[in-house]
């Protein structure tokens, strides 16, 4: 097979530890399936601030741009939390999304059998929950003009939320396409009773909908969606929404599965290129101890194989291996009922590698 | 006692039915406690659109302005959903908040004993949950400039989120004051890692915090808050946040209690004046059938007595009466386990009146 270039940006906290296991998994799939990867590492986030004076060094961006996919660990930590804006890890995150044109963030929220009881929701409510949040990632209030000014009543701060029709259309079409491959239900979330951007959003969705007569569409107001996710999570299939609402709702959806340490995500642009990362953060409190759960990052590799490379055989092998290892009762500390029997990051990685 | 003027805007759907019961309760407290009320009714919402061509007629606003408190039922319904903006019930809602200077929305999210099992959360997670969301109500993206324009990539929509220091300070001080009367914990929710308005918000909170050394303060990012409400609802006491985040989080918090049909809310300005309404909507599907649950509206009266009038004896009597009637097993359809034994709106109102 042709060699695929993977940019690896391990980042901060537990990032390097979980990424190391994901790379072992990728190497195993080279052996087993004959795929070939070339890894190039880049500094990103807090570590890049420390070593290069910026969260997203030009070099790292170059590495990403000439790669076929990016594998990201996690960024951030208390060390950088009080830095000025340009020197904060999050600024790197927003920068890389914009620079790579990653306008779509895809977050499957699924229930793992072994974690059924980890949710704070009643099992009968959760039963059958399997949804994807498709979040617009390079527009809206995240990227609009922001500034301070003197107003009539003293200093004021301003954020601007902007969406154009093309930005809405591309993410909504992608969500419809994804819904088509699943249960064929799309919930479009907005606040059209208040926001102009939401009215543009809803008009655009309604204009596009006739192209997808096979997909059942509902419009849900964002406040109502926050409630319905709690009341009837299993009734959702694909949820599509703008950047800020997606940030909130995708975290709510992830938490209600009880599986947040196991969830993967993809950020996509035009074409097959994508950035893959676990949903969980850099967990600075347990960094460097070799006890972090690598499963979310390993499953992010499976997502990469499916969405960027079309390596469905290897993706399935990874997913099956994860299931097998969990079904056999192996647990890292975060998901262990009996903490004394918990295994470490590399032991978990090793078991999954061997199961492939 | 001096006569208190109450503006009654019953609104649409089940609004008139539940408000009628709340008024019976107020009249009973006139008899029992010697308080005196004068009620003046105003058209508002969909019915005002139909009869006056605007959701918030000038007359109604005048009635509210010369009253000591406003009792609101509910507004809206499918009939008006596709109207142009000026002819939508929500526009009236935003208009009345602004016109009356109601900058603070207070939403207690509490668990009712009789509804413990109605939540989709596990009882052990919910145990002890008793929180208040204090939402800024007249600023932020709700009231900033909104418009369409032609951009480089076709038509775009713009919403503007603006906050000045004074707006943040008054709501945050109010939240600190409320926390002082409770468990002395305040969670301030923002998105300071992305938004300029959130940075202004957080700076202001931090500047004010030293005036409240007895209140424990935490800053929580909005995405994280959406998760923590699910994970550890009982650890929150008072949550204060800006308008849009408050809209989402207060609905999430209400839903997780499982008691949404029973929750009341207050919208306050400077001074004692306030607007009181149930959290639930106008429920057009069951309107006019005499089966709606009046408890949330009746409890809104208790909130009015406490916050606007300082009638704590009557407030307590109402709350105790509600508890007594529920403990005796009486239920409206929405909260009945055995629907065949459900009682109607006025029967429930009557029982509560008699228990005062
Ligand atoms: C760190 C932050 C800027 C980021 C976001 O809000 O997008 C994070 O919450 C996420 O969801 O990836
Ligand atoms: C109807 C709508 C404009 C309103 C809001 O968003 O404020 C409602 O959701 C609420 O919370 O009172």
Image: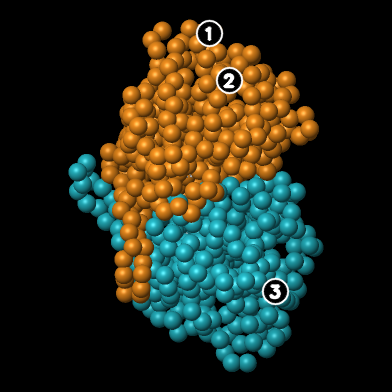
Chain colours: A orange, B cyan
Chain for disc number 3: B
Label 1 secondary element? helix
Q: Is residue B164 above or below residue B113?
A: below
Q: Residues within 10 Å of mark 2 (few under 14, many from 20)?
A: some
Q: CA distance from mark 3 to mark 1?
A: 73 Å
Q: Position of residue A227 (x, y in %)?
A: 56, 49
Residue B83 in sight in this render: no
Marks 2 and 1 belong to one chain = yes
Residue where numbered disc 1 is placed: A31
Q: Nearer the viewer, mark 2 or mark 1?
A: 1
Taking the spot 74% from the left edge, 71% from the top edge, the residue there is B321
Q: Is residue A117 above or below residue B208?
A: above
Q: Position of residue A279 (x, y in %)?
A: 53, 36
Which residue is nearer to you in this view: B27 or B183? B183
Horizontally, residue B26 falls left or right of residue B90, namely right
Query: On the image, which quarter does residue B18 sit in?
Result: bottom right
């Amino acid at each position: 097979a042709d060699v695929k270039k993977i940019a690896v940006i391990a980042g901060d906290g537990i990032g390097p530890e979980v990424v190391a296991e994901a790379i072992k998994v990728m190497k195993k799939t080279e052996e087993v399936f004959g795929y070939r990867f070339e890894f190039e590492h880049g500094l990103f986030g807090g570590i890049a601030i420390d070593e290069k004076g910026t969260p997203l060094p030009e070099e790292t961006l170059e590495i990403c741009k000439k790669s076929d996919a990016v594998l990201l660990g996690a960024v951030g930590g208390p060390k950088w939390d009080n830095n000025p804006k340009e020197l904060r890890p999050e600024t790197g995150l927003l920068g890389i999304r914009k620079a790579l044109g990653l306008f779509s963030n895809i977050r499957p929220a699924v229930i793992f059998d072994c974690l059924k009881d980890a949710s704070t929701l009643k099992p009968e409510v959760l039963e059958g929950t399997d949804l994807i949040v498709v979040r617009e990632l390079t527009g809206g209030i995240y990227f609009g003009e922001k500034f301070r000014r003197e107003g009539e009543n003293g200093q004021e701060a301003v954020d601007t939320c902007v969406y154009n029709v093309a930005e809405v259309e591309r993410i909504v079409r992608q969500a419809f396409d994804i819904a088509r491959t699943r249960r064929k239900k799309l919930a479009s979330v907005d606040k059209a009773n208040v926001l102009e951007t939401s009215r543009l959003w809803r008009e655009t969705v309604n204009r596009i909908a006739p192209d997808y007569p096979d997909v059942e569409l509902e419009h849900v107001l964002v406040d109502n969606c926050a409630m319905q996710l709690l009341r009837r999570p299993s009734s959702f299939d694909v949820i599509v929404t703008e950047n800020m609402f997606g940030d909130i709702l995708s975290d709510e959806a992830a938490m209600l599965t009880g599986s947040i340490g196991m969830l993967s995500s993809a950020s996509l642009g035009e074409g097959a290129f994508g950035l893959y990362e676990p949903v969980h953060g850099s967990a600075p409190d347990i960094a460097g101890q070799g006890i972090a759960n690598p499963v979310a990052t390993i499953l992010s590799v499976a997502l990469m194989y499916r969405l960027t490379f079309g390596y469905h055989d290897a993706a399935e092998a990874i997913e099956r291996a994860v299931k097998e290892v969990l079904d056999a009762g192996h647990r890292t500390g975060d998901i262990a009922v009996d903490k004394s029997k918990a295994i470490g990051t590399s032991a978990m990685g090793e078991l999954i590698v061997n199961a492939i």
